[in-house]
Amino acid sequence: MKAKELKPGVYWVGAIDWNVRDFHGYETPRGTTYNAYLIVDEQIVLVDTVKKTHSAELLQRISSVVDPSRIDLIVANHVEMDHSGSLPEVLAAAPKARVIASPNGEAGLKKHFHQDWPMKAVRTGESLKIGRRTLQFVQVPFVHWPDSMVTYIPEDRILLPNDAFGQHYASANLFDDQNSFGVVQFEAAKYYANIVMPYGPQVAKALDAIAGLDIDLVGPSHGVVWRSHFKDILADYRKWCAGESRNEAVVVYDTMWGSTEAMAKAVASVFEQRGIPVTMRSLKHTHASDVITDVMTARYVALGCPVLNLSMLPTVAGFLAYVKGLKPVRKRGLVFGSYGWDGRAIQEAEGILKGIGWEFPVPAQSVKWVPNSDDLGKLAASLEPLFG
Ligand code: FEO
């Protein structure tokens, strides 16, 4: 396991996790990488580490360039343990190293590891001269944790923004242009939807903070290094953080005996008749982390919620908990569903989405037991105000 050189003296020394399929509830069918970067100058600097399970791979890749005992500084851009998890192993191998983090990062690392490591806190605007190169630090709070920070190397025009611009995508090819751009762009969108989306205003500020930087390479902490398509992904981030959507619809639903599914099809046909591309997502068949990616970019979101034991069907309740946390914005919503003897859970579902600011031009639509063609016709006719 060897390092890969990004520019003379700057190396990728991360780990590839080919097999991870669940990332705290986010389904990752393409695995992921934990990217760490080694800078060899008068001082030797490691930027971020990897998940604890992959510490041996990290140390092996570092050792292909320098003896880890020579590391002087470890920059911890982010406390989350997919990036800090190997700090104990690295510090054991690099006893003279000091850890550099934002003030919240320093506090967070102490609360995670309960160790008295030599540490130095840095703030936006501070820099460290490490020889020919300088490390400049910019705090980007809530992109996506309070501690988050990016590191910029002006002499090499390299930005190391940690989770920002990342993708859960394991590949033997390190650079964006060595992979299918469509696949990488999709994984970047899915990553944004599942990890970064609640913090749109903070992302906009972070994009402004890096806007003036002269950038050749962007090395996020997951997935590929951007060298050809950074402008494209930056443009996507501008749209996503502003909540811009396409004139498209997603119908998300589950069903017990086919009634709510029949309603879902009637709703989908209304969008289709209006020339609005519509995607149907059954929560029995599509993971919430994929559904939320569709939701992020669609203008209209219709949710089909059956009632079980006077409550929302648990798959729908779980999905709503996920949506409530991720807070996609600027949506026109619709909730519908079938019930047996009490349909109030359908209104409860609508209430949750109203609570995150979605517009509901049409009140929740429900049908008792099994809808007939009249019921489905009435449901379709009721949608008119959605398009007003
Ligand atoms: Fe990739 Fe927030 O950790």
Image (cartoon, helix red, strand yellow):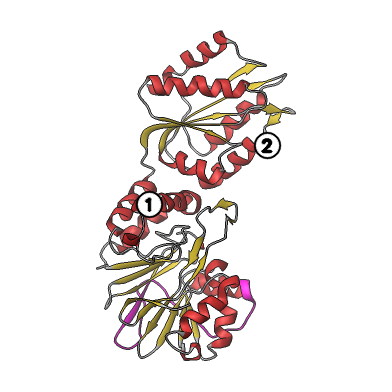
Q: Is residue 120 visible in this depiction of the protein?
A: no
120, above or below 219, in the image: below
The tag on residue 185 is 1
Residue 33 to residue 137: above or below:
above
Q: Secondary structure at mark 2?
A: helix
Q: Position of residue 235 (x, y in %)?
A: 30, 51
Q: Which quarter shows the C terminus?
A: top left
256 to the left or right of 385: right
**Magenta stretch encompasses residue 128:** yes
What amino acid is found at the position of numbered circle 2 in the picture? Pro
Q: In which quarter of the view is residue 376 placed?
A: top right
Element class at badge 1: helix
Specify the amino acid type for callout 1: Gln
Q: Residue at x 34, y 46 (%)?
A: 239
Asked whether the viewer can see residue 109, the reply is: yes
Upstream in sequence: badge 1 or badge 2: 1
> What is the quadrant of residue 278 in the picture?
top left
Say few, some or many: other residues with alpha carbon within 10 Å of mark 1 (under 14 / 14 to 19 / 20 or more): some
Judging by the rendered image, the residue that carries numbered circle 2 is 314
Question: Which region shows up in magenta?
Answer: 112-137
